[in-house]
Amino acid sequence: MLSRSAAVRWRRAYRRVVRSAFDTVPFYRERWALDGRTDPTLVPGRTGSLDGATDPETLRRTVVDLVPLSGGSTRSDPVRGLGRVLPRARGPRAGTLVVVVDGHACAPPADLPRGLRGCVVDPDFLGDPDSAVLVEVTNALHRGAPVLAVGGDKELARLSAALPESLARRLDRLPRRTLSELDAGPYGVLHDPLLGYLGAFGECGRWHLDTRNVYARPTKGGLAVTLLTQRSPVLVDVLVDGGVRASVDTCPRHGTPVVSL
């Protein structure tokens, strides 16, 4: 079971983010003051239509109001958190080239563990044999260097098809799953286009959350996720996939939070 002290610290970190968002972020200040929220309830008697959770499309339309009053970025990062979840998902060895196949990513992941290199490739450009990323991947595979591709099933298939068959067989693939696509592994990473990478499939057969950076709670609208360490834009109680009924439990083997449908 999740130790009482760990559970308290996790929830305390979440409550700090909620309080800070209410005090300093225009979107949450207005929304929760008028409509309310739960867990914690900030305005007595006002609990919110969805317990205070918000669908991602609303947040995208009002992203300028997600910046704290002290200032900050309005850009969300779809590859945020990948470096945190990779060790549990795959344990790549030093020297691995991590290729994120994602048409929405603008820059390589900035949080990869030491010794790993990262790049991103738009699957729509994989047909170009002169693509700089494709050339880099091909050269790495020719040298026998480890290459780990992260993406959805279709994106990974397109990358494999763009490589010579002999090289495609050497490519290590790590499937990306959304909350509504959770399966029985045997490996994968949990992703949301707005929030980034939220967790990974462990060797125990369960989908583990990245508890240092992510908090999740069930609401009337579905599972809501909060980024605990992102300064701006502030993303609190986001309904993943627009609202998916899922539960947060404790892994009996590791004693840490896991998510399941």
Image (cartoon, helix red, strand yellow):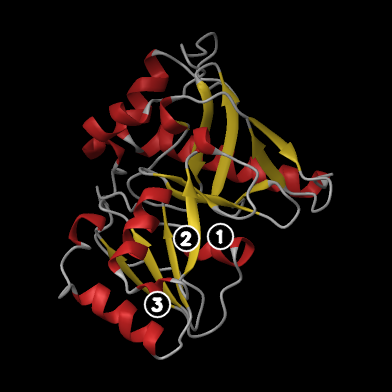
**Which numbered circle lies on residue 167?**
3
Instruction: Give the class, few, some or many, for how many residues have Cα within 10 Å of label 2's Cα (few <14, many ≥20).
Output: many
Q: Indicate whether 37 appears above or below 21.
A: above
The CA span between labels 3 and 1 is 26 Å
Q: Which residue is mark 1?
A: 85
Q: Are marks 2 and 1 in contact (CB under 8 Å)?
A: yes
The label shown at residue 82 is: 2
| Disc on the earlier residue, 3 or 1 | 1
Residue for point 53% across, 84% down: 94
The answer to whether residue 29 is seen in the rendering is yes
Left or right: residue 7 versus residue 200 is right
Q: Quadrant of residue 108?
A: bottom left
- The three-letter amino acid code for the residue at tag 1 is Val
Marked residue nearer the N-terminal end (2 or 3):
2
Q: Identify which residue, 129 or 5, lies in the foreground.
A: 129
19 to 71, vertically: above or below = above
Q: Amino acid at mark 2?
A: Leu
Residue found 33% across the figure and 53% down from its top: 77
Q: From mark 2 to mark 1, how far is it between C-alphas? A: 5 Å
State which quarter of the image contains the C terminus: top right
Question: Can see residue 62?
Answer: no
Q: Nearer the viewer, mark 2 or mark 3?
A: 3
Query: For residue 65, what is the image quadrant?
Result: top left
What is the CA distance from the residue labelled 2 to the residue labelled 3?
24 Å
